[in-house]
Image (cartoon, rainbow, N blue to C red):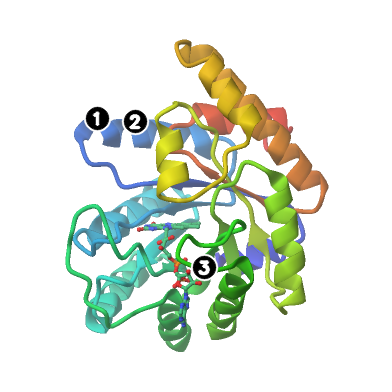
Amino acid sequence: MRITELLNAGRKIFSFEFYPPKTEEDARRLFDSARELKALNPDFVSVTNSSSGATPYRTVALSGVLKAELGLETVAHLTCVAHTRAEINDICLRLKAMGIKNILALRGDIHNHEGAPVKREYNYAAQLVADLKKSGDFSIGGACYPEKHPEAETLDADIDRLKEKVDAGAEYLITQLFFANDFYFRFLDKTAAAGINIPILPGLMPLTGYKQLENLTKLMKVSVPDVVRAGLERWAGDKENLFKFSVDYASVQARELLEKGAPGLHLYTLNRSRAAIDILKNVKARV
Ligand code: FAD
């Protein structure tokens, strides 16, 4: 099923994000988590894709297995910055052969960790969206950033670019994670004012370790409110209470988002199920 059909059905939708495992142990954990999360009847799951261009078929393979073996509607992330058009075409043919009907079209980070060369046939996600739209084979989603993308000069400038991505054919958007709902609500107002009228699914991730903070603030430039920092500091030596603090915080966020009209929730799971299960339980969704 196309994600747009789900979003247009008028009920809240819930989704979980996974990444392709690197080791046998990762793989076991991922499939255990996916099976547990399947019991919550998610509307879809999504599978990330490295921006280096080195391993797109891990995403293709995992997307196919999650769909065929577990019957989960799957959105394959597809980054374009390190691929040629011919490579993108090949990946799409394989996704289509696996029965995948949904792609989250992304540019990917240019300075990727793996140092692979960037081919520069694509500079921005909107170009990939336009190519995918022409093929007509997929329902296309895109990424957006309630606090602005780190490279954008201002939020308004970023939203102007986002409008181009939507005009090129993106049918829904999933946000970067955020810890203060005001960012999301302000973003909805601004995108609506800019003429963006497609569903914007909020992305949430409970922090289950203090280390994640550095990544979020330095690389992704996501703001972390003092109350979250204080909680992480307070429970730094106590895994169980740290987990509970983060899940409770994300649950409060989730409840408010849903009550105030968000179309659903996209949970970044890091291939683990427990936090996602607890959050959905706390907001009384699907459990
Ligand atoms: P774009 O929409 O192309 O925007 C990138 C930047 O370029 C923005 O600052 C924008 O304002 C600017 N811009 C756009 N068009 C123009 C133009 N014509 N001229 C000048 N500037 C322009 N990364 C991965 O590697 N793998 C993943 O699986 C992955 N999944 C993600 C899922 C979600 C929900 C989100 C929010 C992000 C994800 N990312 C992933 C991260 C993403 O790839 C990076 O944030 C990347 O830097 C930008 O990708 P984009 O698709 O948002 O790019």
Residue 125 on image: x %, y %: 43, 74
Q: Is mark 3 within 8 Å of ligand 1?
A: yes
Q: CA distance from mark 3 to mark 2?
A: 28 Å
**Is residue 152 visible to the viewer in this orientation of the structure?**
yes
Q: Residue at 22% across / 41% down in the picture?
A: 22
Query: In this view, which residue lies farthest toward the bottom?
Result: 134
Q: Nearer the viewer, residue 286 or 248?
A: 248
Q: Residue at 45% across / 11% down in the picture?
A: 237
Residue 231 to residue 280: above or below: above
In the rendered structure, which amino acid carries the disc numbered 1? Glu
Labels 3 & 1 near each other (Cβ < 8 A) = no
Q: Which residue is mark 2?
A: 29
Callout 2: helix, strand or loop?
helix
Q: Earlier in the sequence, mark 3 or mark 2?
A: 2
Q: Which residue is mark 1?
A: 25
Neighbour class for label 1 at 10 Å: few (<14), some, many (≥20)? few
